[in-house]
Image: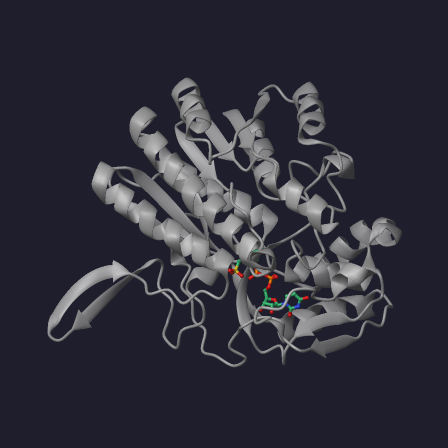
Amino acid sequence: MKILVLGGDGYLGWPTACYFSRRGHDVLSLDNFSKKKIENENGVSTLLSTLTIQEKIINWNKNNNKKINFETCDLLNHRSIYKKLEEFKPDAIIHYAEQPSAPYSMKDRSSAYFTQMNNVMGNLNLLFGIKKYCPEAHLVKLGTMGEYGTPNIDLEEGWLQINHNGRSDKLLFPKKPGSFYHLSKVHDTNNIEFACRLWNLKCTDLNQGVVYGCDTEELKDYSDDMGVSFHYDDIFGTVINRFISQSVTSKKLTVYGAGNQKRTFLNINDTLKCIELSVNNPAEAGEFRVFNQYTETFSINELSKIIQDACSELGRDIEIVNLENPRLEDAEHYYNPKNSGLISLGLKPIKFEKDLVKSMILKLDKYKDKIDIKRFLPSLKWQN
Ligand code: USQ
């Protein structure tokens, strides 16, 4: 297949390009380097994956039959993405090309504006481009579980059958997101669903949980500077990757609030499997299909305890600290999301357990001195 990866320089984009190249597909990878710009402006950087994307691809292409092609492209420049779609004619488009940080989106007006402009308008340009140049292509779009928030009802996969005043209809699941970033994905959802109805496009929207991991099967035989873009900081570091980095440096695990908020999680290798399952089992023309892409649910307290116990088994005493929650989140809530779609397609989840935690800690131990512990405390508050 011809696979177009958008956001090819990111935490998921680079491993995805490698995953599909290794399996014999033609991969074109695009990125506008907006995440690199935000990294530079905020003084944060990835711990692994320190080579440039161009250097990584040269190394990859030396050792693999199916070459990855990389080009710079900004989805906000519609002519640029139109040209790539017209020339490459992808069968599947894997769309990660969005500003991914909730804290960054809450920093100030211009960060919120950039997040929604980049994400929502970039996605809109892409939809018009698909309609014009490759309406048969299957769009696999990364949404987020955070679109739903934590309502007091079961979370279905994207849609909800509603009975109201004696009539019934199947409608998009109501959303109650908790940041301008998560809101940008809600707006994308609405635009894509409409485009599927309007132009008969096919899309799978993957509402993904919090991804963790510092390695993928395809990259594990390469040096770490070729690896995944691993962040532990308060802007791009997600909670498990942060807690592991805090453990490596013998710092306290920073639980926000009382730690009873629950979230969904998945290993980065499972992300790749989910993407492959979606690509291999495309949506129908006109279909807006939604999968909840996660494998496990934990409260932040449960997570911190698993990591603390794993550290004890390594002979390290790690403390947990409860910080005032910088975010707007329900401290106590009902949470029962469904995820049967990808499981029924064959996903076999990797479990987040102590041995996996230990392997992450042992891998990152050698970078202990490179971790900037000043970036463990949250610097951005939602209600400033
Ligand atoms: N948290 C802590 N301590 C920390 C960092 C986070 O307790 O040091 C808590 C937060 O309060 C929150 C949870 O961990 O309840 C998750 O936070 P996160 O920073 O790991 O994830 P989040 O900001 O929600 O966003 C991340 C990715 C985003 C993706 C989303 C999936 O950055 O791109 O869409 O996870 S989800 O959360 O399911 O919406």
Q: Position of residue 266 (x, y in %)?
A: 56, 56
Give me the residue at 49% from left, 66% from top.
178
Q: Position of residue 63 (x, y in %)?
A: 69, 22
> Along the line of sight, which residue is nearer the eye, 66 or 120?
120
Q: Quadrant of residue 169?
A: bottom left
Q: Position of residue 253 (x, y in %)?
A: 74, 70
Specify the color scheme. one colour
Q: Quadrant of residue 137?
A: top left
The C terminus, quarter of image: bottom right
Please tell me whether residue 252 is drawn above or below residue 65 in the rendered image: below
Give me the residue at 69% from left, 60% from top.
234
Q: Left or right: 255 with respect to 174?
A: right
Is residue 356 at all visible to an observer of this figure? yes
Give me the residue at 86% from left, 49% from top.
366
Please tell me whether residue 304 is drawn above or below residue 279 in the rendered image: below
Q: Which image quadrant shows ligand 1?
A: bottom right
Q: Left or right: 31 with respect to 283?
A: right
Is residue 23 at all visible to an observer of this figure? no
Check the image and name the residue furthest to the left: 166
The N terminus, quarter of image: top left
Please tell me whether residue 286 is drawn above or below residue 159 in the rendered image: above
> Along the line of sight, which residue is nearer the eye, 341 or 292?
292
Q: Position of residue 258 (x, y in %)?
A: 63, 81
Count the labels in the image.
0
